Image (cartoon, rainbow, N blue to C red):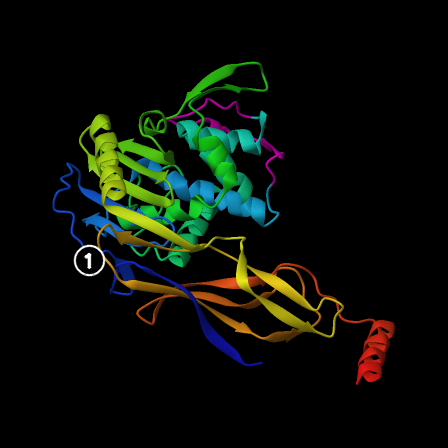
Amino acid sequence: MKKGLIIAAAAMLCVAAVGGGLKMRAQAEDVELSCKAAYLMDEASGVQLYAKNEETRLPIASMCKIMTLLLAFEAVDNGELSYEEEITVSERAAGMGGSQVFLGAGLTYRADELLKSIAVCSANDSCVAIAERVAGSEGAFCAEMNERAKKLGAENTLFANCTGLPKEPQYSCAKDVALMLRELHKYEKYHEYSHIWLEDFVHPDGRTTQMTNTNKLIRSYQGCAGGKTGFTNEAGFCLAAAAQRGETQVISVVIGADSSQNRFSAVSSLFDYAFDNFESVTYLRAGDAAEQRIGVRGSRVKNMSVTAEHTLSAISRRGTEETYALGYELADEVRAPICNGDVLGYAILTRDGVEVDRTALLAAEDAPEFTWWEAYREGARYWHHG
């Protein structure tokens, strides 16, 4: 079947391709941060908006729990774990130090309560309980964390545990943390947890532990959409957070600030810089139907809509102009049977004719093949009108 690229829309934006990725041409000389490393990314497109030592390998403390949560949510997606499942806590998990909700060894807790405690109050004991349930041991879970990091393109990341507690060798970088948080943000369940400010964690034995969100920006910064803090003496004060205003969604990471207040101030400054200087345009949102429909042969379904697998958008610096266009690589017609979710083509975002992003276009419904009787009637209809 012949496919072609059909240009559907255009707008004026400005980014530059650099080193296999994208970053804004404009520099942020006016942004001064007191930290070891920082990174600012447009969440939808992955375009870099600001960077400071973004690939320098550093300890990231509890920000590594972003990957712990990501693997847990993916285990739910894969049917390997359910939010309602009761998990029995081991002696090892219950004995973890640092931030915790004081799980009782031998007691059982719902998986969603454990995940919530990780997202809200950075509970180390819950991290280990989840890791042991998903992979059998924390060591095996760490191997999965490292494998997932590679698949994400996090090239300067190595995990040694699922909590971020000091252990050598273990490191990541500001850019890699942003990639991890971007992936985690795809999960609605995470957003349910990340906006909780204060909540009681009730234990099966009747005890109660109060959880307070470690990310203060969810209350103090307009549009903050969650994030993860971290602190050890080795890592300093760290924060990865996301924020949205209008169509613009950004992720900011700060590593190695010298105080808790300074990490929040640094991330807030990066958010302010993004919203003051950039704007995002969404061309096709995940789940929305593309402008074109596709014909179907051999089915009572004659044509169907196709929906985007993920969002295509682009960000621009205010006051700059450069042409972006959305096109479709889609056959005029496909042959039944087609199942809901089958990949039928692609939507492609280009800048000056160069592809910068694409998403699969998925069948929005089933198109079963004709039964024998349907095929007979269809043939008779064409013969009668022939």
Q: Is residue 172 visible?
A: no
Q: In this view, does 1 lie above or below 198?
A: below
Please report the residue visible at 76 percent of the width from the left and 68 percent of the height from the top: 300
Is disc 1 surrounded by few (<14), some (14 to 19) or many (20+) residues within 10 Å?
A: some
Please name the residue shown 53% across and 14% down the image.
Answer: 207
Give 186 or 298, whichever is nearer the viewer.
298
Reply yes or no: does residue 319 show up in magenta: no
Q: In this view, does 290 lie above or below 176?
A: below
Q: In this view, does 345 lie to the left or right of 367?
A: left
**Residue 257 location (% of width, % of height):** 20, 34
Position of the C terminus by quadrant? bottom right
Q: Nearer the viewer, residue 166 or 3?
A: 3
Going by the image, does 96 lie left or right of 255? right
Viewport quadrant of the N terminus: bottom right
Label 1 amino acid?
Arg
Q: What element carries label 1?
A: loop
Q: Name the residue under label 1.
A: 25
Residue 22 visible? The answer is yes
Q: Indicate the quadrant where residue 382 lies.
A: bottom right
- Tell me: residue 119, above or below residue 385: above
Q: Which residue lies furthest to the front in this view?
A: 385
- The total number of labels drawn is 1
Q: Position of residue 352 (x, y in %)?
A: 30, 69
Main secondary structure type of the part rendered in magenta: loop
Query: Which portion, as a residue range, is magenta?
Result: 82-105
Residue at point 70%, 72% (across, down): 336
Indicate the quadrant where residue 154 lies.
bottom left
Residue 89 included in the magenta stretch of the image:
yes
Residue 162, x across and y down, in percent: 41, 40
Q: Which of 48 and 205 is in front in this view?
A: 48
